[in-house]
Image (cartoon, rainbow, N blue to C red):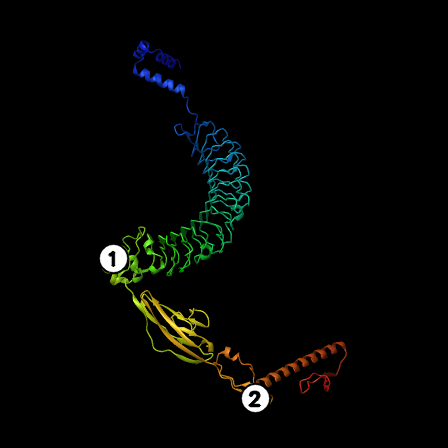
């Protein structure tokens, strides 16, 4: 300090005196004096011995030092403190009190199982707090007291079981909360009270069995919600009510999710929706219909088999659809009709054999098309893709042909323009056997009408009923797998003209067959006893036809039935007498006779009033 004072006084004296001092000390002496003065003016920045401190950036790095307690001696000017990868187990009350300028605190990868109330008190300027990969099981109310300016909180990969009421009450300016990969089984209805500015919430891989609708309804500023790896099998109606600002919803890896209720997303104005790695077998058209602002839709890795025509037209602003890794067999014509902004389709790794131009509202708007990983049939249906293959972006994944064999595994980019007419062609559907199949059968019989067709690609065979409605593979009148039409147990009303239609991309062909069903004639005869009877048909006749007969039994059948009934009555009476005999023997009272009175019906069919009473006398031996 004395040398520094002399040097400073020399500077102040100036002139000849300063020149003489410099000459005496030399150049190295001057530098030494200057460094001494600087050190005296700026004392060393305080830093714990086990840590590394950088005064220029105000960072303190204590990561990976095997610390079992938070060290002391930090500078009050510190802005970033890294205590990750240590052995900390407990954070005491006001553990970091005094670090008022701290902006970021990292406590990740420790063994913290207990955080006392007000542990972060005094960190009023803290913006980022990371406590992931610890052993926290519960967050007591008041732990986050004093963190009113926190923006980002990462508490993922802990063992937290429940979020209690008002657990985050102090964090009024929090924007992002990552609570994924915990053991959450319950979230209290008021757990998120106070998070009025939260914009992004991530809850992955927990044990929740239902959507915490009431708790989420407190987050009215939420714009992004990510829910991954949950064991929820159904999304109920109004599952995300009051989240009017929600724009992005991600539902990923829910293997039990099979259905979405029609009003699950009611009230939301989503622009991005991701439902992937679930068990949806169909696109939830009813759930999506009101999402007029949706631009991005991802339904990949679901066992969805088709995209139906004219069912997505309500999604007026849709730009991208991803449905890769599914079981898609067909994209119907008009599937994307009305989607004037549609520019990207990703249907890679499915079972598609083709994609027709008629599926799109306008292929001129399409910019990116992913068809790779499908067993594509390179015929006229894909000619529109080939003609646009230069300016159409396949996202660095070139589609390849699966059929015909001569071009199998060839990439689309490898074809020349001259090859296209000879390879990418179709042969119009044609019904092979056009001979007349008009038939006239009796009611109750069964008949088959054949309809075999040929063409390339293989034609799709359908049948239309006499009322021009499409027949299916179920019911009494049904279409078989081989394209034949089966009419079982024919009825008179089945009479009429049926049409078989064979269709493929190159055209269609049709035939008509006429069926005439004759009703079964009924031969009625009058017996002497005024009983109607009819001549029965052979057992081969349809049982449903016989069921319409108003007199199902003839006279002979009635006599047999009456006799059998009388014999059953006598058998019952005999059993009763045997029982009486045994009982009287045991009582010592033997009755040798019994009298049974009966009242016969009158010949006119009246009751027993005024009629004669007959009497049977039976002896017990």
Callout 1 secondary element? loop
User: To which residue does mark 2 refer?
Assistant: 526
Q: Residue at x 38, y 15 (%)?
A: 4
| Most foreground residue, 65 or 337 | 337
Q: Earlier in the sequence, mark 2 or mark 1?
A: 1
Callout 2 secondary element? strand
**Residue 283 percent coordinates (x, y):** 43, 57
| In this view, 480 is above or below 219 | below
Q: Quadrant of the N terminus?
A: top left
Residue 379 in view in this figure: no
| In this view, 349 is above or below 165 | below
Q: How many numbered discs?
A: 2
Q: Is residue 205 left or right of residue 421?
A: right
Tags 2 and 1 touching, CB below 8 Å: no
User: To which residue does mark 1 refer?
Assistant: 415
| In this view, 514 is above or below 354 | below
Please tell me how crowded label 2 is: few (under 14), some (14-19), or many (20+) other residues with Cα within 10 Å: few
Q: Residue at x 64, y 81 (%)?
A: 568
| Most foreground residue, 161 or 245 | 245
**Residue 419 percent coordinates (x, y):** 23, 60
Residue 447 in view in this figure: yes
**Image disc number at residue 491:** none
Please tell me how crowded label 1 is: few (under 14), some (14-19), or many (20+) other residues with Cα within 10 Å: some
Is label 2 or label 1 in front?
Answer: 2
| In this view, 509 is above or below 384 | below
Quote the CA–CA distance across marks 2 and 1: 85 Å
Point out the residue furthest to the right here.
589
**Residue 610 percent coordinates (x, y):** 73, 85
Q: Is residue 360 left or right of residue 246?
A: left
Q: Quadrant of the C terminus?
A: bottom right
Q: Is residue 361 left or right of residue 110?
A: left
């Amino acid at each position: 300090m004395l040398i520094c004072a002399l040097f400073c006084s020399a500077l102040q004296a100036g002139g000849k005196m300063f020149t003489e001092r410099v000459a005496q000390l030399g150049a190295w002496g001057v530098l030494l004096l200057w460094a001494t003065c600087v050190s005296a003016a700026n004392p060393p920045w305080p830093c714990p011995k086990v840590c590394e401190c950088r005064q220029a950036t105000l960072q303190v790095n204590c990561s990976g030092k095997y610390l079992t307690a938070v060290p002391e001696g930090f500078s009050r000017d510190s802005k970033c403190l890294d205590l990750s990868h240590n052995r900390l187990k407990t954070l005491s009350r006001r553990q970091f009190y005094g670090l008022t300028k701290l902006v970021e605190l990292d406590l990740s990868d420790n063994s913290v199982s207990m955080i006392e109330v007000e542990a972060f008190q005094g960190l009023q300027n803290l913006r980022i707090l990371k406590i992931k990969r610890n052993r926290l099981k519960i967050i007591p109310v008041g732990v986050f007291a004093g963190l009113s300016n926190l923006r980002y909180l990462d508490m993922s990969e802990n063992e937290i079981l429940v979020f209690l009421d008002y657990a985050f009450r102090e964090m009024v300016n929090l924007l992002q909360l990552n609570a994924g990969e915990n053991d959450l089984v319950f979230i209290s209805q008021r757990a998120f009270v106070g998070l009025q500015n939260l914009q992004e919430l991530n809850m992955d891989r927990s044990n929740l069995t239902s959507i915490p609708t009431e708790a989420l309804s407190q987050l009215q500023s939420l714009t992004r919600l990510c829910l991954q790896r949950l064991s929820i099998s159904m999304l109920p109606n109004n599952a995300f009510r009051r989240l009017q600002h929600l724009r992005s919803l991600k539902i990923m890896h829910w293997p039990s999710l099979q259905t979405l209720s029609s009003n699950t997303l009611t009230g939301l104005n989503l622009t991005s929706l991701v439902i992937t790695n679930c068990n949806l077998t169909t696109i939830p058209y009813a759930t999506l219909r009101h999402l007029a602002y949706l631009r991005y839709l991802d339904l990949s890795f679901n066992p969805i088999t088709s995209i139906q025509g004219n069912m997505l037209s309500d999604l007026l602003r849709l730009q991208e659809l991803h449905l890769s890794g599914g079981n898609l067999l067909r994209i119907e014509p008009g599937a994307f009709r009305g989607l004037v902004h549609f520019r990207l389709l990703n249907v890679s790794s499915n079972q598609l054999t083709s994609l027709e131009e008629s599926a799109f509202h306008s292929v001129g708007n399409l910019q990116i098309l992913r068809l790779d990983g499908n067993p594509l049939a390179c015929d006229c249906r894909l000619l529109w893709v080939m003609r646009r293959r230069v300016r159409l972006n396949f996202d660095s994944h070139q589609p390849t042909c699966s059929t015909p064999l001569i071009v199998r595994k060839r990439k689309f980019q490898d074809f020349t323009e001259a090859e296209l007419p000879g390879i990418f062609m179709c042969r119009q559907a044609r019904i092979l056997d056009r001979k007349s199949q008009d038939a006239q059968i009796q009611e109750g019989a069964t008949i088959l009408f054949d309809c075999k067709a040929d063409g390339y690609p293989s034609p799709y065979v359908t049948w239309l009923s006499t009322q021009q409605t499409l027949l299916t593979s179920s019911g009494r009148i049904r279409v078989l797998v081989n394209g034949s039409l089966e009419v079982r147990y024919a009825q008179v009303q089945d009479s009429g003209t049926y049409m078989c239609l064979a269709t493929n991309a190159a055209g269609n062909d049709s035939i008509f067959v006429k069926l005439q069903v004759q009703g079964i004639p009924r031969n009625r005869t009058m017996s002497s006893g005024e009983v109607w009877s009819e001549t029965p048909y052979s057992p081969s006749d349809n049982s449903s036809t016989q069921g319409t007969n108003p007199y199902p039994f003839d006279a002979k059948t009635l006599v047999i039935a009456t006799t059998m009934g009388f014999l059953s009555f006598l058998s019952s009476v005999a059993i009763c007498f045997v029982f009486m005999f045994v009982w009287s023997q045991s009582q010592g009272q033997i009755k040798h006779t019994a009298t049974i009175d009966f009242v016969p019906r009158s010949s006119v069919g009246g009751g027993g009033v005024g009629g004669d009473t007959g009497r049977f006398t039976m002896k017990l031996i």
